[in-house]
Amino acid sequence: MDRKYLVFLDIDGVFTSSRVHYAHNAVYEMWHRFDPVAIDFMNKIHDRYAVEFVLISTWKNYLRNDDSTIEHWIRSAFANSGFRGNFAEMWKTDPDNLWINKPPPYDRSHEIKDYLAEYATDVKDFIIFDDNDYNFEKVLGVRRWVRTDPENGLLYKHMKKAQSLMGQWHEK
């Protein structure tokens, strides 16, 4: 049986950061340029393992999972940045935007837990890239989180931690 893995991705603090924004000398005030190093590292994961990527970022909130235009826009934004990875068929957590009606402490960790239960029956393992702690380890019961830097994004130490978490994954 083929082994499949999931990579859950935040955007701010992983793909975008103050460091990237400042270096880019952008006129547009909001972070909007993806970090080429983060893109390269995710491409490395894609090239090495049978992975699918899933967005967990607030950037996906209110976007409809069944809107092909929105899905195209998301995939294009990543592809235009050089990302070669494959998004899962259900490309975001909380696909029906039900989180709006859930009281705290419902958050990303619960969205991931729900996603794994609903859409990831054939997944062997997963990893999470996020700069914020949503009690991932407590809610999910495993240490699969790489905490990136909110100001600097994905750094070398984060890549090394991710590689150690993926150490038992079978290569393609």
Image: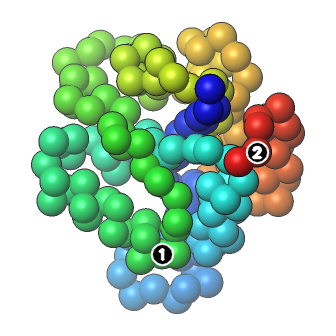
Q: Is residue 86 left or right of residue 135?
A: left
Mark 2: secondary structure = loop
Residue 145 percent across, percent down from the top left: 68, 33
- Which residue appears at 60% of the width and 67% of the height? 39
Residue 86 percent across, percent down from the top left: 47, 54
Question: Relative to 136, does residue 91 appear above or below in the rendering?
Answer: below
Label 1 vs label 2: CA separation? Answer: 25 Å
Label 2 crowd (10 A; few <14 / some 14-19 / many >=20): few
Q: Is residue 152 left or right of residue 57?
A: right
Q: Which is nearer the eye, 4 or 146? A: 4
Label 1 crowd (10 A; few <14 / some 14-19 / many >=20): some
Task: Look at label 1 and name its amino acid.
Answer: Ser
Specify which label sits upstream in the sequence, 1 or 2.
Answer: 1
Q: Quadrant of the N terminus?
A: top right
Name the residue carrying label 1.
81
Residue 53 visible, this angle: yes
Task: Look at label 2 and name its amino acid.
Answer: Glu
Question: Relative to 164, does residue 96 appear above or below in the rendering?
Answer: above
- Which residue appears at 47% of the width and 18% of the height? 121
Asked if the residue under mark 2 is in contact with the one under mark 1, i.e. CB atoms within 8 Å, the reply is no
Quarter where residue 99 is shown: top left
- Which residue appears at 13% of the width and 49% of the height? 67
Residue 171, numbered label: 2
Q: Which is nearer the eye, 29 or 63? A: 63
Residue 73 percent across, percent down from the top left: 26, 64
